[in-house]
Amino acid sequence: MKYNEKEEDAVPEGYTPEQLAQFLEWTRAHPYGDQDENGVDFSRLRANLKLTPTERVEKRRRAARGVKEMKNAGIRAGLQPHSKG
């Protein structure tokens, strides 16, 4: 797929005129990708379902570890955590 600033320039190669019209219609109707009416990103769901349960847990552990590291870096820099309330 080619990408430039304009939507019409971001066109997959090899589409028939009918396929191109469908592609452009769909991308205009779904500006944030494949989502439901609540904004749930189906592409992320599909990607996570390709992982084993163990891989999903490890992915969440790495994310939690990163959040903890950022929090600790903020504390070392003298920033105060937000108060709950």
Image (cartoon, rainbow, N blue to C red):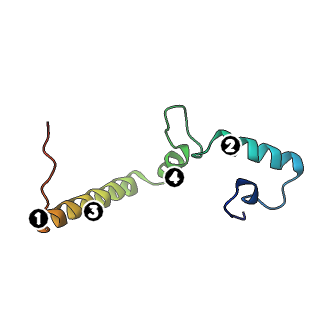
Quarter of image, res 78 = bottom left
- Residue 3: image x %, image y %? 68, 64
**Residue labelled with disc 2:** 28
- Please tell me which residue lies in front, 6 or 15: 6
Q: Mark 2 or mark 3, which is nearer to you?
A: 2
Q: Nearer the viewer, mark 1 or mark 3?
A: 1
Compared to residue 67, the image places residue 42 above or below, namely above
Q: Which residue is outermost to the top?
A: 37
Image disc number at residue 78: 1
Q: Residue 70: horizontal and vertical position, in percent?
A: 23, 63
Q: Nearer the viewer, mark 2 or mark 4?
A: 2
User: Label 1's element?
Assistant: loop
Q: Kindly identify the residue that appears in the image at 17 percent across and 63 percent down.
A: 74
Specify the amino acid type for callout 1: Gly
> Disc 4 designates what residue?
47
Q: Earlier in the sequence, mark 1 or mark 4?
A: 4
Q: Disc 3 residue type?
A: Gly
Quadrant into which the C terminus falls:
top left
Distance, label 1 to label 2, CA atoms, is 45 Å
Q: Earlier in the sequence, mark 3 or mark 4?
A: 4
- In the image, what residue occupies the spot 61% across and 45% down? 31
Q: Could you give the CA–CA distance between mark 3 and mark 4, rounded to whole angstroms?
A: 21 Å
| Label whose residue precedes the other's in the sequence (2 or 4) | 2
From the image, tell me which residue sits under label 3: 66
Q: In the rendering, at what x and y percent does residue 4 appear?
A: 69, 64
